[in-house]
Image (cartoon, helix red, strand yellow):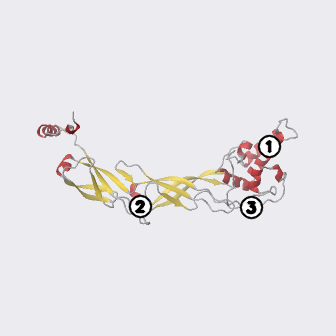
Amino acid sequence: MEFKDYYQTLGVAKTATADEIKQAYRKLARKYHPDVSKEQNAEERMKQVNEANEVLSDPEKRATYDQLGNRYQGGQEFQPPPDWGGASGFSGAGAAGAGDFSDFFADLFGQSGRGGARSYKMRGEDHHARLMVELRDAYEETIRSLTLSIPETDEQGRTAMKQHTLKVRIPKGVKPGQHIRLSGNGSPGSGGGAAGDLYLEVHFKPDPQYRVDGRDVYEIVGVTPWECALGATIEVPTPTGKVQLKVPAGSQTGHKLRLKERGIPGNTSGTPAGDLFIVLKVELPPADTDKARKLYETMAQELAFDPRQKMGA
């Protein structure tokens, strides 16, 4: 069975007001009413228009239809949700009997005719969003505010996007790709069904100083040529504060120094903390003064050093 796009049938937007739906219905009824229409398919088109109007002009039916419409497009194969109830809440036949409407309508609203919506409970749809945090947020529990656009249905059954601000607890030890679940913050349920959930996928904001791999953190630290050549103890800022770090003599750019369990902390499930790797980057002082240039000239003359010697001819 195909899902029917009632909005397309009436030629209105999903945000159409009750008056706009009424006007569209009247216009189409004048065009396709079998008593006056000369269209060859007038009777069938009028049935389709009546069915679409029956749903969209009733706030309760429209809300039910919109809840399903978030998951389907016109012409797609339709299957009622597994928790769709079997009891019909219709009261009276109205202007058209159940036989005037499609099997799709009957599956949504029951077999007994018109006048009300089927009694059922359906859980609301889950929502997903990306949450950007600082690397330092992973080292201790923090609270962040998050503003999202969430669809809401008003009393007339119209769906519109509303701004919601949520307080989000970022647990200690969170890592990229991890999901934070906010229960009940998805789409509202129908027929008394529970609301869906909101899932936030954690991503760290780009930082040129740090790179994250799982729970391990890599930090690029600049060092002078003499600190690498002679060895030195340097002060290094880290996500948890400054540390004193010993640079071994003879170090080069790319040399890694490991600080055990100084990476992203472990979590309550027993996952151990990662490590922090300090990656050295030799930075040369600029030759922007006479004294600096003379020092470089002296090094060039006194040091027999050719970094390309090992490359061969």
Would you name the residue on which mark 3 appears? 86
Residue type for callout 3: Gly
Left or right for 179, reference 80: left
Residue 296 higher or lower than 144, as above or below: above
Can residue 205 be seen here? The reply is yes
Which residue shows up at 84% across the image and 53% down it? 97
Q: How many marks?
A: 3
Which circle's residue, 2 or 3, is located before the other in the chain? Answer: 3
**Badge number at residue 68:** none
Mark 2 vs mark 3: give the one in front. 3
Residue 87, position in %: x, y?
76, 62
Residue 100: x and y in percent read 82, 49
Query: Do the residues bearing badges 2 and 1 touch, measured as CB atoms within 8 Å?
Result: no
- Residue at 21 percent across and 35 percent down: it is 312
Q: Position of residue 50 (x, y in %)?
A: 80, 47
Give the CA separation, mark 2 to mark 3.
46 Å
Q: Is residue 272 above or below residue 39?
A: below
Q: Residues within 10 Å of mark 3 (few under 14, many from 20)?
A: few
Looking at the figure, which quarter contains the C terminus?
Answer: top left
Mark 2 sits on what residue?
173
Give the CA distance from mark 2 to mark 1.
60 Å
* Residue identifier under label 1: 26
Q: CA distance from mark 1 to mark 3?
A: 33 Å
Q: Nearer the viewer, residue 224 or 152?
A: 224
